[in-house]
Amino acid sequence: MIQSLEVELELCIKTEKCLLRDISQLDNCNNSLLLSEKYRSKSNIMKQCFDTNYQVVQQLLLGPSPADNTSNLLQNIQFATSTSDNSQDLMLGNGGVTNTNQKEIDGYDTAQQVIHHTSRDWTSGSKSCREATNGWIVNALVENISTTIISSSSSSTAGRRELRVLVPGAGLGRLAYDIATSTKLHDHYGVDVHVEANDSSLTMAYATQSVLEIISSQYQQENQQQYVIYPFISDPTRNEVDSKKRFEYEMFPDDDALDAYQSYYRSSTDKHINNHITNEDAKTNTLLPNLSYTVGDFVSTYSQSTKQSQYDVIATSFFLDTATNIYEYIMIMKHLLKQKQSSTTSLWINCGPVQWHPCALLHPTVDELYDMLVVCGFELISWEINNNEVVAYRHPDDCGSICGEGGDKARYTRAEGYCPLRFVARLVDDGEEEDDDDLPLRIEYCEYLNGVANGGGSSS
């Protein structure tokens, strides 16, 4: 970005000298109107902003200090590896069987992506985007869990209920965090939530761990420091309305994230005190949300037999359309959810667009996707696209006046947003528990088919 701007600056200076022959006679006030002067000023400010972002990314990826004694909100990070015996350069999952350079995750581990995900997940400026996506998912989960608990309360045994939730494509972990710290689930309905975040990016896992460490230390050590990032500094130099808006900053973590942890921590502490747990024990991880992170490709990791019927709920946000072959995703979701004989939940809750990433080989429409879910054994409890609601992916300014949240001044002459597909799907109880022991083999064959459809060179 800086290099490109410097090239533009040099071109601008030479052009002005050539076409504006009387430029040397302009006074200082008029000089400031020249594009070259604006570029000089912009270049200096951008260097400072990039340096700030670099320092933030470096801190997030270094992780917590070994000497830090605060409890870590992220209980553990697990690393999953592909079980494929094929020695060729096969990549199961997002991107299909392709060369590494063609993977959908190319560029996903960059510093720019860390900044964008931090902005979307952990700043106040993106709160409205999260409320329309993560907020809807959490509310749908609470609503369906509360209905289940009420309807089964007469036959249930005493004690708290455990709920295992998987969040694929977790990115920087905010959705997983919001579910894990939901006081409605924990306090109102007596549910102990075990949340497992998953992403193919090790970078995102470590950055998540660092953000959660910041939240934990701010409460336990009463350190209220927040960090500055510049989320718009790397945006393309197109469709900009006001040059100064590129340099607007955001603070993270946001107050809602801090409040959620404090509410959960205090609630857990009160329960320990009421149960006569010592203060020393009250400082252990038993007070913390049960939140873990698995690093691994979704298809190859979760199609394994050991994952069958392990989860009550799967929550996906802006993930469904990353599939190379959407049939694989759907069947793996079914494979992961507990059969209804052993669970009264078995829900897949989704929110996001259906834009289909470059790796996708199948591109069903929304109505076609509905039929696919039904055929594969899901009952659609809720299915909606609100045409009157446009949601930005990163920040409400991305939608500008379309969302009505662009502020006094529009940021761009082009608006980009989505009318997300939101659904709640329940696994149908057909009276027989399916045997999916051969699912890994079937998925591997589908990956072979994906490779053939994608060019077929490396899959023969």
Image (cartoon, rainbow, N blue to C red):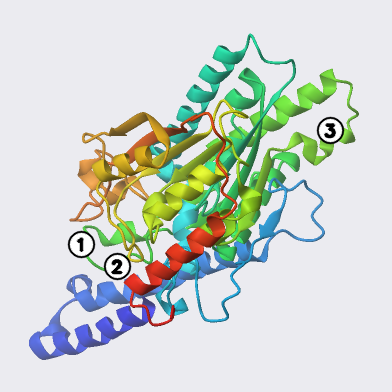
Q: Which mark lies nearer to you, 3 or 2? A: 3
Residue 15: assigned label: none
Crowdedness near tag 2: few (<14), some (14–19) or many (≥20) residues, C-alpha within 10 Å:
few
Q: What kind of residue is marked 1?
A: Asn
| Residue 393 left/right relative to 211 | left
Q: How far across and how far down the image is residue 256, in percent?
A: 54, 36
Q: Is mark 1 on a helix, strand or loop?
A: loop
Which part of the image, by quadrant, shows the N terminus? bottom left
Residue 291 picture quarter: top right
Q: What kind of residue is marked 2?
A: Pro
Residue under label 1, please give it.
Answer: 239
Q: In this view, does 318 lie above or below 182?
A: below
Q: Do the residues labelled 1 and 2 touch (CB within 8 Å)?
A: yes
Residue 408 visible somewhere in the drawing: no
Inter-mark Cα distance, 3 to 2: 49 Å
Which part of the image, by quadrant, shows the C terminus? bottom left
Inter-mark Cα distance, 1 to 3: 53 Å
Residue under label 3, please give it.
Answer: 282
Q: What kind of residue is marked 3?
A: Ala
Query: Which residue is drawn at the image coordinates 64% and 62% (left, top)?
Result: 80
Residue 17 visible somewhere in the drawing: yes
Residue under label 2, please give it.
Answer: 236
Q: Which of 138 and 423 is in front in this view?
A: 423
Q: What element carries label 3?
A: helix
Q: Is residue 160 above or below residue 249?
A: above
Query: Which residue is drawn at the image coordinates 21% and 42% (left, top)?
Result: 402
Q: Which mark lies nearer to you, 1 or 3? A: 3
Q: Do the residues labelled 3 and 2 touch (CB within 8 Å)?
A: no
Q: How far across and how far down the image is residue 121, in percent?
A: 49, 48
